[in-house]
Amino acid sequence: MGPAYFVIAILGCADGGTSCTPVATLQTRYASVGECSAAAGAALEANSDFDFPTLLARCGPGTAKAAAEAQRDEPLPPPARRG
């Protein structure tokens, strides 16, 4: 089973992209990596106010902790009974 969702991380790079630091993770969740990638360019433009010579937007899976919290919000199935 793959990730439950994908998020965009904004990375600040000091040396042209080889040594980057995460500076923001956007709250929007995407159902597929394709949807996330399609939104990455606009997300980078909207979040370009960090003090780094180079900024990158990367899609990645949502964290396991966040996925577990999202699953907690879903109703639980009725308990199974053994006879």
Image (cartoon, helix red, strand yellow):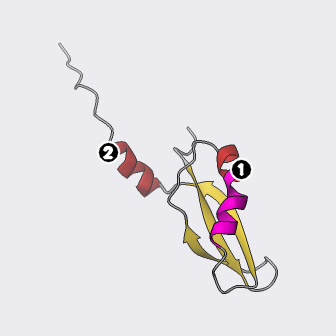
Q: Residue furthest top?
A: 83
Which residue occupies the foreground of this view, 73 or 51?
51
First in sequence: mark 1 or mark 2? 1
| Badge 2 amino acid | Arg
Per the image, label 1 sits on a secondary structure element best described as: helix
| Tally of marks | 2
Residue beneath disc 2: 72
Per the image, label 2 sits on a secondary structure element best described as: helix
Q: Quadrant of the N terminus?
A: top right
Which residue occupies the foreground of this view, 59 or 63?
59
Query: Up-down: is 34 above or below 56?
Result: above
| Badge 1 amino acid | Ala
Q: Is residue 43 magenta?
A: yes
Tell me which residue sits at (62%, 56%) in the image. 60
Q: Position of residue 17 (x, y in %)?
A: 79, 76
Q: Residues within 10 Å of mark 2 (few under 14, many from 20)?
A: few
In which image quadrant can residue 41 be found?
A: bottom right
Q: Is residue 18 magenta?
A: no
Q: Quadrant of the C terminus?
A: top left
Q: Position of residue 14 (x, y in %)?
A: 74, 86
Q: Classify residue 36 as left or right of residue 76.
A: right
Tell me which residue sits at (61%, 65%) in the image. 9
Q: Which mark is residue 28?
A: none
Q: CA distance from mark 1 to mark 2?
A: 29 Å
Magenta residues? 38-47
Q: Residue furthest left?
A: 83
Residue beneath disc 1: 38
